[in-house]
Image (cartoon, grey):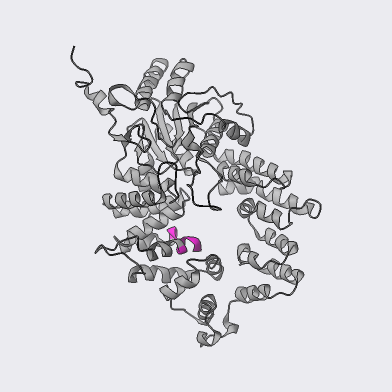
Amino acid sequence: MVNKSLFSSETDQSDRADSINEAGGLAYQLEPKHALAQIAATGTFGNSYYSTAETQLAEMMKLVDLVDDNQFLAKLALYAREKACMKDMPAALLVALSVRDTVLMHRVFDRVVDNGRILRTVFQMIRSGRFKNASGKARLGLSSSIQRAFQRWLNSASVGKLLSASIGNDPSLRDILRMARPTPQDNARRALYGWLTDKSIDKWAPATEADLPVEVQSLIAYRNSATEEVQALIASGLDNVRWDLLSDAAKGPTVWKALAYKMGPQALRMNINTLQRHGVLSVGHSPSMVDYVADRIADESEIRRSKQFPYQYFAAYLNVNDDVPQKVKTALQKAAEIACGNVPKLPGPVVIGLDTSGSMHSPVTGNRGQGATSKMRCIDVAALFAAAILRCNPDSVVIPFDTSAYHAAIDPEDSILSIAQRLAEYGGGGTDCAQPIRAANKWFAHRQFAGVVLVSDNESWVGCGHGGATGVMTAWTDFVARERKLSDSKTDPKLVCIDLQPYQTVQAYERSDIMNIGGFSDAVFNVISAFLEDDNRRFVAEVEAMEL
Protein backbone atom coordinates (compact mmCIF):
# COMPACT_ATOMS: atom_id res chain seq x y z
CA MET A 1 0.00 0.00 0.00
CA VAL A 2 1.34 3.45 -0.94
CA ASN A 3 2.40 5.81 1.87
CA LYS A 4 -0.68 8.08 2.18
CA SER A 5 1.14 10.52 4.42
CA LEU A 6 3.53 11.18 1.55
CA PHE A 7 1.07 10.87 -1.36
CA SER A 8 -2.03 12.49 0.12
CA SER A 9 -4.63 14.16 -2.08
CA GLU A 10 -4.39 17.81 -3.08
CA THR A 11 -7.27 18.61 -0.70
CA ASP A 12 -5.43 16.99 2.20
CA GLN A 13 -2.22 18.83 1.28
CA SER A 14 -3.98 22.19 1.53
CA ASP A 15 -4.86 21.48 5.17
CA ARG A 16 -1.25 20.75 6.11
CA ALA A 17 0.02 23.15 8.81
CA ASP A 18 2.79 25.45 7.61
CA SER A 19 3.97 26.97 10.88
CA ILE A 20 4.63 26.44 14.57
CA ASN A 21 2.95 28.76 17.07
CA GLU A 22 4.46 30.38 20.18
CA ALA A 23 3.38 27.41 22.32
CA GLY A 24 5.13 24.92 20.01
CA GLY A 25 2.01 23.51 18.34
CA LEU A 26 1.09 23.11 14.66
CA ALA A 27 -0.45 26.24 13.16
CA TYR A 28 -1.05 28.25 9.99
CA GLN A 29 0.83 31.45 9.23
CA LEU A 30 -1.29 34.50 8.48
CA GLU A 31 -0.43 36.54 5.41
CA PRO A 32 1.27 39.88 6.30
CA LYS A 33 -1.76 42.18 5.98
CA HIS A 34 -3.90 39.92 8.14
CA ALA A 35 -1.12 39.37 10.67
CA LEU A 36 -0.58 43.12 10.98
CA ALA A 37 -4.32 43.72 11.38
CA GLN A 38 -4.40 41.03 14.09
CA ILE A 39 -1.62 42.77 16.02
CA ALA A 40 -3.16 46.22 15.52
CA ALA A 41 -6.50 45.08 16.97
CA THR A 42 -5.05 43.24 19.98
CA GLY A 43 -1.54 44.50 20.70
CA THR A 44 -0.92 46.78 23.66
CA PHE A 45 2.90 46.68 23.86
CA GLY A 46 2.61 44.80 27.14
CA ASN A 47 4.15 41.45 28.06
CA SER A 48 1.69 38.66 27.22
CA TYR A 49 1.87 34.95 28.10
CA TYR A 50 3.87 33.98 25.01
CA SER A 51 5.51 37.25 23.92
CA THR A 52 7.09 40.41 25.27
CA ALA A 53 6.41 44.07 24.54
CA GLU A 54 9.73 44.17 22.68
CA THR A 55 8.69 41.22 20.52
CA GLN A 56 5.37 42.87 19.66
CA LEU A 57 7.11 46.04 18.49
CA ALA A 58 9.66 44.09 16.44
CA GLU A 59 6.96 41.94 14.81
CA MET A 60 4.81 44.97 14.06
CA MET A 61 7.68 46.82 12.40
CA LYS A 62 8.67 43.73 10.40
CA LEU A 63 5.10 43.35 9.14
CA VAL A 64 4.89 47.05 8.28
CA ASP A 65 7.96 46.56 6.07
CA LEU A 66 6.29 43.55 4.39
CA VAL A 67 3.02 45.39 3.69
CA ASP A 68 3.77 47.54 0.65
CA ASP A 69 0.44 49.34 0.77
CA ASN A 70 0.42 52.73 2.44
CA GLN A 71 -3.33 53.14 2.07
CA PHE A 72 -3.82 49.93 4.02
CA LEU A 73 -1.52 51.21 6.79
CA ALA A 74 -3.53 54.44 6.98
CA LYS A 75 -6.84 52.57 7.09
CA LEU A 76 -5.50 50.12 9.67
CA ALA A 77 -4.42 52.99 11.93
CA LEU A 78 -7.99 54.34 11.68
CA TYR A 79 -9.55 50.92 12.27
CA ALA A 80 -7.37 50.26 15.31
CA ARG A 81 -8.37 53.60 16.84
CA GLU A 82 -12.00 54.04 15.76
CA LYS A 83 -13.26 50.43 15.65
CA ALA A 84 -10.94 48.41 17.88
CA CYS A 85 -10.61 51.31 20.37
CA MET A 86 -6.86 50.77 20.76
CA LYS A 87 -4.46 53.51 21.89
CA ASP A 88 -0.80 52.63 21.39
CA MET A 89 -1.05 50.54 18.21
CA PRO A 90 -2.76 53.20 16.05
CA ALA A 91 -0.19 55.73 17.26
CA ALA A 92 2.65 53.38 16.25
CA LEU A 93 1.09 52.78 12.82
CA LEU A 94 0.73 56.54 12.32
CA VAL A 95 4.42 57.09 13.12
CA ALA A 96 5.37 54.25 10.76
CA LEU A 97 3.22 55.85 8.05
CA SER A 98 4.85 59.24 8.62
CA VAL A 99 8.18 57.94 7.24
CA ARG A 100 6.52 56.38 4.16
CA ASP A 101 3.73 58.67 2.98
CA THR A 102 3.39 62.13 4.53
CA VAL A 103 0.29 62.96 2.48
CA LEU A 104 -1.63 59.99 3.87
CA MET A 105 -0.24 60.65 7.34
CA HIS A 106 -1.74 64.15 7.26
CA ARG A 107 -5.09 62.78 6.02
CA VAL A 108 -5.54 60.49 9.01
CA PHE A 109 -3.54 62.30 11.71
CA ASP A 110 -6.43 64.19 13.32
CA ARG A 111 -8.69 61.09 13.39
CA VAL A 112 -6.05 58.86 14.96
CA VAL A 113 -4.84 61.59 17.30
CA ASP A 114 -8.31 62.39 18.67
CA ASN A 115 -7.18 63.41 22.14
CA GLY A 116 -4.17 64.67 24.06
CA ARG A 117 -3.17 61.25 25.36
CA ILE A 118 -2.69 59.92 21.82
CA LEU A 119 -0.81 63.11 20.90
CA ARG A 120 1.64 62.51 23.74
CA THR A 121 1.96 58.83 22.75
CA VAL A 122 2.84 59.73 19.15
CA PHE A 123 5.34 62.30 20.40
CA GLN A 124 7.00 59.82 22.76
CA MET A 125 7.24 57.16 20.03
CA ILE A 126 8.97 59.62 17.71
CA ARG A 127 11.27 60.84 20.48
CA SER A 128 12.24 57.25 21.37
CA GLY A 129 14.20 56.80 18.15
CA ARG A 130 12.66 53.34 17.54
CA PHE A 131 11.28 54.34 14.13
CA LYS A 132 13.69 54.80 11.24
CA ASN A 133 13.40 57.38 8.46
CA ALA A 134 13.82 56.61 4.75
CA SER A 135 17.64 56.61 5.07
CA GLY A 136 17.53 54.11 7.91
CA LYS A 137 18.49 56.61 10.62
CA ALA A 138 16.63 56.77 13.91
CA ARG A 139 14.12 59.59 14.05
CA LEU A 140 14.66 61.41 17.35
CA GLY A 141 12.77 64.63 16.66
CA LEU A 142 9.83 65.92 14.66
CA SER A 143 10.37 66.01 10.91
CA SER A 144 9.10 69.15 9.19
CA SER A 145 6.05 67.26 7.92
CA ILE A 146 4.96 65.74 11.21
CA GLN A 147 5.83 69.01 12.96
CA ARG A 148 3.21 70.67 10.72
CA ALA A 149 0.69 68.01 11.76
CA PHE A 150 1.40 68.74 15.43
CA GLN A 151 1.15 72.49 14.82
CA ARG A 152 -2.19 72.08 13.04
CA TRP A 153 -3.55 69.93 15.88
CA LEU A 154 -2.40 72.40 18.53
CA ASN A 155 -3.67 75.49 16.73
CA SER A 156 -7.07 73.98 15.90
CA ALA A 157 -7.69 72.39 19.31
CA SER A 158 -10.21 74.10 21.56
CA VAL A 159 -9.10 75.56 24.88
CA GLY A 160 -10.79 72.64 26.64
CA LYS A 161 -9.01 70.10 24.44
CA LEU A 162 -5.61 71.71 25.09
CA LEU A 163 -6.25 71.78 28.82
CA SER A 164 -7.21 68.10 28.68
CA ALA A 165 -4.01 67.39 26.74
CA SER A 166 -2.02 69.00 29.56
CA ILE A 167 -3.02 66.14 31.91
CA GLY A 168 -0.06 63.78 32.20
CA ASN A 169 3.73 63.93 32.09
CA ASP A 170 6.71 62.35 30.38
CA PRO A 171 6.08 63.61 27.83
CA SER A 172 4.05 66.62 28.87
CA LEU A 173 2.15 69.04 26.66
CA ARG A 174 4.87 71.55 27.55
CA ASP A 175 7.46 69.25 25.93
CA ILE A 176 5.34 69.00 22.78
CA LEU A 177 4.72 72.75 22.52
CA ARG A 178 8.41 73.50 22.91
CA MET A 179 9.38 71.10 20.14
CA ALA A 180 6.44 71.70 17.77
CA ARG A 181 6.66 75.51 18.14
CA PRO A 182 3.17 76.36 16.84
CA THR A 183 2.61 80.00 15.79
CA PRO A 184 -0.28 81.46 17.82
CA GLN A 185 -3.02 83.14 15.76
CA ASP A 186 -3.90 85.77 18.38
CA ASN A 187 -3.01 87.04 21.83
CA ALA A 188 -5.43 84.67 23.56
CA ARG A 189 -3.64 81.66 22.05
CA ARG A 190 -0.24 83.30 22.63
CA ALA A 191 -1.02 83.75 26.32
CA LEU A 192 -2.38 80.19 26.55
CA TYR A 193 0.80 78.72 25.02
CA GLY A 194 2.91 80.83 27.37
CA TRP A 195 0.94 79.61 30.39
CA LEU A 196 1.05 75.97 29.27
CA THR A 197 4.84 76.11 28.79
CA ASP A 198 5.45 77.86 32.14
CA LYS A 199 7.02 80.91 30.53
CA SER A 200 7.19 84.08 32.59
CA ILE A 201 4.41 86.54 31.72
CA ASP A 202 6.85 89.12 30.30
CA LYS A 203 7.76 86.58 27.59
CA TRP A 204 4.14 86.39 26.39
CA ALA A 205 4.32 89.88 24.91
CA PRO A 206 2.40 91.41 23.32
CA ALA A 207 -0.08 89.13 25.18
CA THR A 208 -0.74 89.72 28.86
CA GLU A 209 -2.34 87.76 31.68
CA ALA A 210 -5.65 89.43 30.82
CA ASP A 211 -5.57 87.65 27.43
CA LEU A 212 -5.78 84.21 29.02
CA PRO A 213 -9.03 82.40 28.10
CA VAL A 214 -11.72 82.60 30.77
CA GLU A 215 -11.45 78.84 31.38
CA VAL A 216 -7.78 79.23 32.31
CA GLN A 217 -8.46 82.20 34.55
CA SER A 218 -11.17 80.21 36.33
CA LEU A 219 -8.82 77.23 36.63
CA ILE A 220 -6.18 79.45 38.24
CA ALA A 221 -8.80 80.81 40.64
CA TYR A 222 -9.91 77.26 41.45
CA ARG A 223 -6.38 76.15 42.25
CA ASN A 224 -5.81 79.24 44.41
CA SER A 225 -9.09 78.92 46.33
CA ALA A 226 -8.72 79.28 50.08
CA THR A 227 -11.68 77.10 51.07
CA GLU A 228 -13.33 73.90 49.99
CA GLU A 229 -16.69 75.66 49.50
CA VAL A 230 -15.31 78.36 47.18
CA GLN A 231 -13.43 75.73 45.20
CA ALA A 232 -16.56 73.60 44.77
CA LEU A 233 -18.51 76.65 43.57
CA ILE A 234 -15.88 77.47 40.94
CA ALA A 235 -15.67 73.81 39.84
CA SER A 236 -19.43 73.69 39.27
CA GLY A 237 -19.18 76.62 36.85
CA LEU A 238 -16.24 75.31 34.82
CA ASP A 239 -18.24 73.83 31.95
CA ASN A 240 -15.41 73.46 29.43
CA VAL A 241 -12.77 72.05 31.77
CA ARG A 242 -12.53 68.31 32.37
CA TRP A 243 -12.99 67.06 35.91
CA ASP A 244 -9.60 65.29 35.96
CA LEU A 245 -7.84 68.60 35.37
CA LEU A 246 -9.33 69.75 38.67
CA SER A 247 -8.88 66.60 40.74
CA ASP A 248 -5.25 67.09 41.76
CA ALA A 249 -6.11 70.31 43.63
CA ALA A 250 -9.49 69.22 45.11
CA LYS A 251 -9.62 70.15 48.79
CA GLY A 252 -12.25 67.73 50.08
CA PRO A 253 -15.47 65.70 49.63
CA THR A 254 -17.58 68.78 48.76
CA VAL A 255 -15.32 69.48 45.79
CA TRP A 256 -15.27 65.83 44.77
CA LYS A 257 -19.08 65.81 44.71
CA ALA A 258 -18.97 68.78 42.33
CA LEU A 259 -16.47 66.88 40.17
CA ALA A 260 -18.73 63.80 40.15
CA TYR A 261 -21.51 65.91 38.65
CA LYS A 262 -19.09 66.96 35.89
CA MET A 263 -18.28 63.34 34.95
CA GLY A 264 -20.08 61.57 32.15
CA PRO A 265 -21.47 58.02 32.62
CA GLN A 266 -18.26 56.37 31.41
CA ALA A 267 -16.02 58.54 33.60
CA LEU A 268 -18.21 57.65 36.59
CA ARG A 269 -17.91 53.96 35.73
CA MET A 270 -14.12 54.23 35.57
CA ASN A 271 -13.73 56.23 38.77
CA ILE A 272 -16.04 54.51 41.25
CA ASN A 273 -13.18 53.62 43.60
CA THR A 274 -11.81 57.17 43.43
CA LEU A 275 -15.18 58.65 44.38
CA GLN A 276 -15.51 56.16 47.23
CA ARG A 277 -12.01 56.97 48.47
CA HIS A 278 -12.87 60.69 48.63
CA GLY A 279 -16.10 60.16 50.53
CA VAL A 280 -18.53 60.86 47.69
CA LEU A 281 -20.22 57.45 47.98
CA SER A 282 -20.41 57.20 51.76
CA VAL A 283 -24.03 56.11 52.14
CA GLY A 284 -24.51 57.68 55.56
CA HIS A 285 -23.30 61.09 54.38
CA SER A 286 -24.54 61.33 50.79
CA PRO A 287 -27.23 58.81 49.83
CA SER A 288 -28.35 61.13 47.03
CA MET A 289 -24.89 60.86 45.42
CA VAL A 290 -25.06 57.06 45.53
CA ASP A 291 -28.43 57.23 43.77
CA TYR A 292 -27.08 59.74 41.23
CA VAL A 293 -23.98 57.68 40.35
CA ALA A 294 -25.94 54.42 40.13
CA ASP A 295 -28.61 55.96 37.91
CA ARG A 296 -26.07 57.57 35.57
CA ILE A 297 -24.09 54.36 35.17
CA ALA A 298 -27.20 52.31 34.35
CA ASP A 299 -28.85 54.98 32.15
CA GLU A 300 -30.39 52.81 29.41
CA SER A 301 -30.66 55.57 26.81
CA GLU A 302 -26.99 56.49 27.27
CA ILE A 303 -25.84 52.86 27.03
CA ARG A 304 -27.91 52.34 23.85
CA ARG A 305 -26.68 55.60 22.35
CA SER A 306 -23.01 54.96 23.08
CA LYS A 307 -23.29 51.28 22.02
CA GLN A 308 -21.20 50.21 24.98
CA PHE A 309 -20.07 46.58 25.08
CA PRO A 310 -20.67 44.59 28.34
CA TYR A 311 -16.86 44.24 28.66
CA GLN A 312 -16.56 47.79 30.04
CA TYR A 313 -19.02 47.13 32.87
CA PHE A 314 -17.59 43.72 33.69
CA ALA A 315 -14.11 45.24 34.00
CA ALA A 316 -15.48 47.90 36.34
CA TYR A 317 -17.34 45.27 38.36
CA LEU A 318 -14.15 43.22 38.80
CA ASN A 319 -12.24 46.29 39.97
CA VAL A 320 -14.62 47.92 42.47
CA ASN A 321 -13.52 47.92 46.09
CA ASP A 322 -15.44 45.91 48.67
CA ASP A 323 -16.66 49.05 50.46
CA VAL A 324 -18.39 50.49 47.37
CA PRO A 325 -22.18 50.61 48.05
CA GLN A 326 -24.11 47.61 46.75
CA LYS A 327 -26.43 49.89 44.79
CA VAL A 328 -23.51 50.98 42.61
CA LYS A 329 -22.38 47.38 42.09
CA THR A 330 -25.93 46.43 41.12
CA ALA A 331 -25.97 49.33 38.65
CA LEU A 332 -22.89 47.87 36.94
CA GLN A 333 -24.67 44.53 36.58
CA LYS A 334 -27.77 46.24 35.22
CA ALA A 335 -25.67 48.23 32.75
CA ALA A 336 -23.99 45.03 31.52
CA GLU A 337 -27.44 43.51 30.93
CA ILE A 338 -28.56 46.56 28.96
CA ALA A 339 -25.31 46.54 26.96
CA CYS A 340 -26.10 43.00 25.81
CA GLY A 341 -28.82 44.59 23.70
CA ASN A 342 -26.03 46.13 21.62
CA VAL A 343 -24.80 42.64 20.67
CA PRO A 344 -26.33 41.62 17.30
CA LYS A 345 -28.52 38.53 17.01
CA LEU A 346 -26.86 35.85 14.89
CA PRO A 347 -28.67 34.09 12.01
CA GLY A 348 -28.83 30.86 13.98
CA PRO A 349 -27.52 29.04 17.05
CA VAL A 350 -23.76 28.56 17.28
CA VAL A 351 -21.32 26.46 19.26
CA ILE A 352 -19.16 28.77 21.38
CA GLY A 353 -15.79 27.24 22.18
CA LEU A 354 -14.39 29.00 25.24
CA ASP A 355 -10.66 28.56 25.88
CA THR A 356 -10.09 28.18 29.63
CA SER A 357 -6.45 27.00 29.46
CA GLY A 358 -3.60 28.31 31.60
CA SER A 359 -2.40 30.98 29.18
CA MET A 360 -5.88 32.50 29.13
CA HIS A 361 -5.48 33.52 32.77
CA SER A 362 -2.96 36.23 31.83
CA PRO A 363 -4.01 39.93 31.63
CA VAL A 364 -5.82 40.65 28.36
CA THR A 365 -3.86 43.86 27.79
CA GLY A 366 -0.56 42.30 28.79
CA ASN A 367 1.60 42.74 31.85
CA ARG A 368 2.36 46.46 31.99
CA GLY A 369 4.01 46.69 35.40
CA GLN A 370 2.71 47.25 38.91
CA GLY A 371 -0.35 49.48 39.02
CA ALA A 372 -0.86 49.50 35.24
CA THR A 373 -1.75 45.84 34.61
CA SER A 374 -5.45 45.18 34.06
CA LYS A 375 -7.32 42.77 36.36
CA MET A 376 -9.27 41.72 33.27
CA ARG A 377 -7.82 38.40 32.08
CA CYS A 378 -8.15 36.81 28.65
CA ILE A 379 -10.43 34.20 30.25
CA ASP A 380 -12.71 36.95 31.59
CA VAL A 381 -13.04 38.55 28.16
CA ALA A 382 -13.61 35.19 26.50
CA ALA A 383 -16.26 34.23 29.05
CA LEU A 384 -17.98 37.57 28.61
CA PHE A 385 -17.98 37.13 24.82
CA ALA A 386 -19.56 33.72 25.24
CA ALA A 387 -22.12 34.99 27.75
CA ALA A 388 -23.08 37.95 25.54
CA ILE A 389 -23.55 35.75 22.47
CA LEU A 390 -25.53 33.24 24.53
CA ARG A 391 -27.77 35.95 25.97
CA CYS A 392 -28.78 37.22 22.50
CA ASN A 393 -28.80 33.74 20.94
CA PRO A 394 -30.18 31.46 23.69
CA ASP A 395 -30.31 28.30 21.54
CA SER A 396 -26.52 28.40 21.25
CA VAL A 397 -24.29 26.22 23.44
CA VAL A 398 -21.07 27.04 25.28
CA ILE A 399 -18.30 24.44 25.57
CA PRO A 400 -15.38 25.46 27.83
CA PHE A 401 -12.14 23.62 27.04
CA ASP A 402 -8.46 23.20 27.77
CA THR A 403 -7.15 19.71 26.88
CA SER A 404 -10.68 18.44 27.55
CA ALA A 405 -14.13 19.73 26.76
CA TYR A 406 -16.49 20.48 29.65
CA HIS A 407 -20.27 20.27 29.94
CA ALA A 408 -21.45 23.73 31.02
CA ALA A 409 -25.01 23.90 32.33
CA ILE A 410 -25.66 27.59 31.75
CA ASP A 411 -29.02 29.32 32.00
CA PRO A 412 -29.13 32.07 29.32
CA GLU A 413 -31.51 34.02 31.57
CA ASP A 414 -28.94 34.24 34.36
CA SER A 415 -27.21 37.61 34.74
CA ILE A 416 -24.50 38.29 32.17
CA LEU A 417 -21.84 38.86 34.85
CA SER A 418 -22.82 35.68 36.70
CA ILE A 419 -22.59 33.64 33.48
CA ALA A 420 -19.17 35.10 32.67
CA GLN A 421 -17.81 34.47 36.16
CA ARG A 422 -19.04 30.86 36.19
CA LEU A 423 -17.55 30.12 32.76
CA ALA A 424 -14.20 31.60 33.78
CA GLU A 425 -13.89 29.00 36.57
CA TYR A 426 -13.45 26.04 34.18
CA GLY A 427 -10.19 24.44 33.13
CA GLY A 428 -6.71 25.88 33.55
CA GLY A 429 -4.55 23.22 31.84
CA GLY A 430 -3.02 22.93 28.36
CA THR A 431 -4.67 23.96 25.10
CA ASP A 432 -6.39 21.86 22.42
CA CYS A 433 -8.58 24.17 20.34
CA ALA A 434 -10.17 21.20 18.53
CA GLN A 435 -11.87 19.98 21.72
CA PRO A 436 -15.12 22.02 21.54
CA ILE A 437 -15.68 21.11 17.88
CA ARG A 438 -15.06 17.42 18.54
CA ALA A 439 -17.38 17.61 21.56
CA ALA A 440 -20.11 19.30 19.49
CA ASN A 441 -19.86 16.54 16.88
CA LYS A 442 -20.35 13.97 19.62
CA TRP A 443 -22.70 15.64 22.12
CA PHE A 444 -24.95 17.43 19.61
CA ALA A 445 -24.76 15.02 16.69
CA HIS A 446 -28.36 15.69 15.62
CA ARG A 447 -28.47 19.46 16.16
CA GLN A 448 -27.99 22.06 13.46
CA PHE A 449 -25.82 25.12 14.01
CA ALA A 450 -25.02 28.19 11.94
CA GLY A 451 -21.41 27.74 12.92
CA VAL A 452 -18.76 27.68 15.62
CA VAL A 453 -17.18 30.66 17.38
CA LEU A 454 -13.85 29.89 19.06
CA VAL A 455 -12.65 32.49 21.58
CA SER A 456 -9.01 31.81 22.40
CA ASP A 457 -5.43 33.00 22.20
CA ASN A 458 -5.01 30.33 19.49
CA GLU A 459 -1.98 28.78 21.21
CA SER A 460 -3.08 25.17 20.77
CA TRP A 461 -0.23 22.72 21.38
CA VAL A 462 -1.88 19.44 22.44
CA GLY A 463 -2.99 17.01 19.74
CA CYS A 464 -3.03 17.31 15.97
CA GLY A 465 -5.20 16.43 13.00
CA HIS A 466 -4.91 14.12 9.99
CA GLY A 467 -2.21 14.42 7.35
CA GLY A 468 -0.25 17.17 9.09
CA ALA A 469 -3.29 19.40 9.62
CA THR A 470 -4.13 21.03 12.91
CA GLY A 471 -6.71 19.33 15.08
CA VAL A 472 -9.11 22.24 14.50
CA MET A 473 -9.07 21.77 10.71
CA THR A 474 -9.74 18.04 10.98
CA ALA A 475 -12.52 18.49 13.55
CA TRP A 476 -14.03 21.29 11.44
CA THR A 477 -14.11 19.07 8.34
CA ASP A 478 -16.09 16.50 10.37
CA PHE A 479 -18.40 19.25 11.69
CA VAL A 480 -19.21 20.50 8.16
CA ALA A 481 -19.84 16.97 6.91
CA ARG A 482 -22.21 16.29 9.82
CA GLU A 483 -24.10 19.54 9.26
CA ARG A 484 -24.48 18.82 5.54
CA LYS A 485 -26.21 15.54 6.33
CA LEU A 486 -28.67 17.30 8.63
CA SER A 487 -29.45 20.32 6.46
CA ASP A 488 -31.34 20.83 3.22
CA SER A 489 -29.70 24.23 2.86
CA LYS A 490 -26.85 24.81 0.44
CA THR A 491 -25.21 27.12 2.99
CA ASP A 492 -22.41 25.51 4.95
CA PRO A 493 -21.74 26.45 8.59
CA LYS A 494 -19.04 29.02 9.33
CA LEU A 495 -16.09 28.91 11.70
CA VAL A 496 -15.05 32.16 13.41
CA CYS A 497 -11.80 32.17 15.39
CA ILE A 498 -11.46 35.19 17.70
CA ASP A 499 -7.87 35.76 18.78
CA LEU A 500 -7.44 37.81 21.95
CA GLN A 501 -3.65 38.13 21.76
CA PRO A 502 -1.23 39.65 19.19
CA TYR A 503 0.20 36.47 17.69
CA GLN A 504 0.64 35.73 13.98
CA THR A 505 -0.49 32.12 13.63
CA VAL A 506 -3.94 30.57 13.67
CA GLN A 507 -5.45 27.10 14.06
CA ALA A 508 -7.65 27.28 10.95
CA TYR A 509 -6.54 28.94 7.73
CA GLU A 510 -8.64 31.54 5.93
CA ARG A 511 -11.13 30.27 3.36
CA SER A 512 -14.76 30.94 2.39
CA ASP A 513 -16.19 29.24 5.51
CA ILE A 514 -13.44 30.22 7.99
CA MET A 515 -12.57 33.65 9.34
CA ASN A 516 -9.89 34.70 11.81
CA ILE A 517 -10.44 37.96 13.66
CA GLY A 518 -8.43 39.77 16.30
CA GLY A 519 -9.59 41.97 19.14
CA PHE A 520 -12.05 42.28 21.99
CA SER A 521 -14.01 45.44 21.15
CA ASP A 522 -17.67 45.63 20.20
CA ALA A 523 -16.66 45.87 16.51
CA VAL A 524 -15.91 42.13 16.63
CA PHE A 525 -19.58 41.25 17.11
CA ASN A 526 -20.61 43.08 13.94
CA VAL A 527 -17.92 41.33 11.89
CA ILE A 528 -19.07 37.92 13.20
CA SER A 529 -22.72 38.66 12.46
CA ALA A 530 -21.94 39.85 8.91
CA PHE A 531 -19.81 36.77 8.21
CA LEU A 532 -22.47 34.34 9.42
CA GLU A 533 -25.02 36.21 7.29
CA ASP A 534 -22.87 35.45 4.20
CA ASP A 535 -21.73 39.06 3.98
CA ASN A 536 -18.19 39.22 2.59
CA ARG A 537 -17.00 41.76 5.14
CA ARG A 538 -14.11 39.70 6.44
CA PHE A 539 -11.56 41.05 8.90
CA VAL A 540 -9.04 42.49 6.43
CA ALA A 541 -11.92 43.65 4.22
CA GLU A 542 -13.34 45.51 7.24
CA VAL A 543 -10.06 47.38 7.52
CA GLU A 544 -9.90 48.10 3.80
CA ALA A 545 -13.48 49.43 3.90
CA MET A 546 -12.44 52.31 6.18
CA GLU A 547 -12.96 55.70 4.52
CA LEU A 548 -9.87 57.88 4.46
- Quadrant in which the C terminus is drawn: bottom left
* Image coordinates for residue 310, horizontal then vertical, percent: 57, 41
Q: In the image, is residue 23 above or below residue 62?
A: above
Q: Is residue 239 visible?
A: no
* Image coordinates for residue 388, horizontal then vertical, percent: 55, 35
- Quadrant in which the N terminus is drawn: top left
Residue name at image x 27 percent, y 49 percent: 66
Q: Is residue 139 magenta?
A: no
- Residues 279 and 450: in front is 279
- Residues 249 and 417: in front is 249
Q: Give the left or right position of residue 322, taking residue 306 as reference.
A: right
- Residues 403 and 210: in front is 403
Q: In the image, is residue 214 above or below residue 47?
A: below
Q: Which residues are magenta?
A: 111-120
- Residues 512 and 533: in front is 512
Q: In the image, is residue 86 above or below residue 343?
A: below
* Residue positioned most to the right: 284
